[in-house]
Image: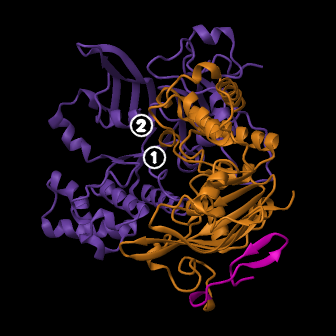
Chain colours: A orange, B purple
Amino acid sequence: MGSAILKVKNLVTSFNTESGRIRAIDDISFELKEKQILGIVGESGCGKSVTALSIMRLLPKPSGVIESGQIMFNHTDIVDLPAEKMHEIRGNRISMIFQEPMTALNPVHRIGKQLGEIFHLHFPDMPKEKIRDESIELLQKVGIPDPESRMNEYPHQISGGMRQRVLIAIALAAKPDILIADEPTTALDVTIQSQILDLMMQLQKETGMAIIFITHALGVIAEICDDVVVMYAGKVAETSPVEHLFEDPKHPYTKGLLTSIPRLESPRKKKLSIIKGMVPSLHELPNGCRFQNRCPEAMEICKTEPPPLKRIADNHFVSCYLY
Amino acid sequence: MSDYLLKVENLKMHFPIHGGIFWRQIGKVFAVDGVSFAVKQGETVGLVGESGCGKTTVGRSILKLYTPTHGKVYFEGKNILELKRKDMQPLRRNMQMIFQDPFESLDARLTIGDIIEEPFLIHSIGNSEERIKNVKKLLNRVGISQNAINNFPHEFSGGQRQRIGIARAIALNPKLIICDEPVSALDVSIQSQILNLLLELQEEMKLTMMFIAHDLAVVKHISDHIAVMYLGKIVEYANADDLYSQPLHPYTRALISAIPVPDPSVKKKRQILSGEVPSPKDPPPGCSFHTRCPIVIDRCKIEDPFLRNMKNTSGNDHQVACHRAGEQ
């Protein structure tokens, strides 16, 4: 695995809301290496989607702003990049797919047109016939049967799994260096989910792109990711190679998550271990460590001082005073 | 026979499709197409399957939220589908439901106190003082502060709302609770809290439960028996442990194999099903799974397999609807 292709450093993104400004992500740092699948996992409100939107510079305007920090993509900081320059990167060098494949496609245009648009946008000189051929080839590559006739269909005529494949095709049209996938399989059935995960791993190998895979499902992380970032309430709790995280989780939140999920092989009707309480609202975050009021191992210092992200092994960072 | 609290026989629910200029019936959605199972007092049966398999429709038909096209539903030995509305009313307090979406299943204009009090009012139980006392007791039991009795649903998080929905469902000491995807809208750390609560309540109140969900790991955790549904039919029915350790139907095997395991050291060989679930408007002839089945033979394309009884290696009854089950 090569050098870092994307480095997020001390990123802070905030939103202006009616009840004041809130920091959806607060000082997060991580690296995406070349040809790697990096998972970002966490519960609702942890800031995983905001991280993706910050990288894409697609934060809702004018409420969402990147307050500080850097996002280094190939030695360029894209945080301050002018809009025109960002256009050249977005969808071209860094592309994204979303959770809800119905709303991400335009319902009034045929699949072929929506796919062709991307080629037209990024390669304005490409002749029409070539665009059509390339589109068909791409649909074939993402496993859509009978791609030629699918080109003439509308999004509502195809299933959720097929729509997600079309979105992947659109995202890959310009052969990006990075694909950001925000919960791409959450809305799908398990058997379709395994098809899409399989497809993404296969495409990653073929094209050599790097993928940021955002999900709430630890099972999915374990199956496809190389490295993982665990987020909690806008902070990075722990980041490590996937094997370490599952074998030897360090942060009490990660431990709690891993033991609380019911597993097929565990005994039935046994009480699941739980993380007490619930995720704090971003409006009323606890002082110190944001996990302290739910943490079984909280100490005095946790209540006052937010813990820094500390390196405890190669590529393994934890923000917890236990280490 | 009498130890079965709920018995469903050949339940069918076909929804008509209307169209054309005279809005005539032009087809049917075979949402549930001949489902039979029985639940013993105090047990939990899990209903698992992918979207569109009919699991929710089964749950709702049992509570007569739909009028089933065909079949019998025996509750304590009485076929409730034949009961008139006024005869059904007293039974309803014994059959309750917990819904998937805690945001939509609670009336936004009522306080949570009113919401939980409503079942007592409908069945005219107690005076106002007793009712309030009961509501507080229920809130306490599901882990919501009594001081919140006058708050509105929007002031609570998803997990808390699901607790309120549970309080409402258990208010009248029901015998049967049908849980329709009660944890799938919740975060992982909240899911386990709710599952624990349901298990505790079941033990305390000797509840019989039907647990409908798409997540086999969750269903297996809470159920005694599991029915796997595909396109409106039960394809396999067995003891929960047996279903996981020795699945007989190729669809069940594929479902188990498709579940991502939270352990990167398990590099299992995944069996990926090709294709998608066919439309229940136009189910394929023969076995409805034959279009995706990895072990399909010619017979499957013509002849619909019955759900037949087999003995598995644990010596338990195990039902499966597959022509090829038990071969070798």
Disc 2 designates what residue?
B56
Q: Secondary structure at mark 1?
A: loop
Q: Residues within 10 Å of mark 2 (few under 14, many from 20)?
A: many
Q: Estimate the x, y position of residue B225 in percent, counting from the top left.
A: 54, 40
- Which residue is the site of mark 1? B181
The secondary structure type at the circle numbered 2 is: helix
* Disc with the residue nearer the chain's start (2 vs 1): 2
Mark carried by residue B63 = none
Given residues B313 and B159, the one toward you in this image is B159
Tell me which corner region of the image, top left, top right, bottom left or bottom right, holds residue B33. Answer: top left
Pick the front one: B179 or A177: A177
**Is A317 covered by the magenta stretch?**
yes
Q: Reply above or below: B22 against B128.
A: above
Residue type at mark 1: give it.
Glu
**Amino acid at dot 2:** Thr
Q: Which residue is depicted at the point 35% across and 70% down?
A: B140
Tell me if A193 is positioned left or right of B269 in this view.
left
The residue that appears at 37% across and 18% down in the rendered structure is B28
| Residue B249, visible in the rendered structure | no
Q: Nearer the viewer, residue B164 or A302?
A: A302
| Residue A193 at x, y percent in the picture | 63, 40
Q: Quadrant of the C terminus of chain A?
A: bottom right
Pointer 2 indicates a residue of which chain?
B
The answer for which chain carries disc 1 is: B
Which residue is rendered at x = 34% and y = 30% of the image? B73
Contact, mark 2 vs mark 1 (Cβ under 8 Å): yes
Check disc 1: other Cα within 10 Å, few if <14, some if 14-19, many if 20+: many
> Was residue A160 drawn as part of the magenta stretch in this picture?
no
Q: How many numbered marks does the figure carry?
A: 2
Question: For the magenta stretch, what is the residue range?
Answer: A302-323
Tell me if B328 is positioned left or right of B312 in this view: right
**Residue A54 % position (x, y):** 59, 63
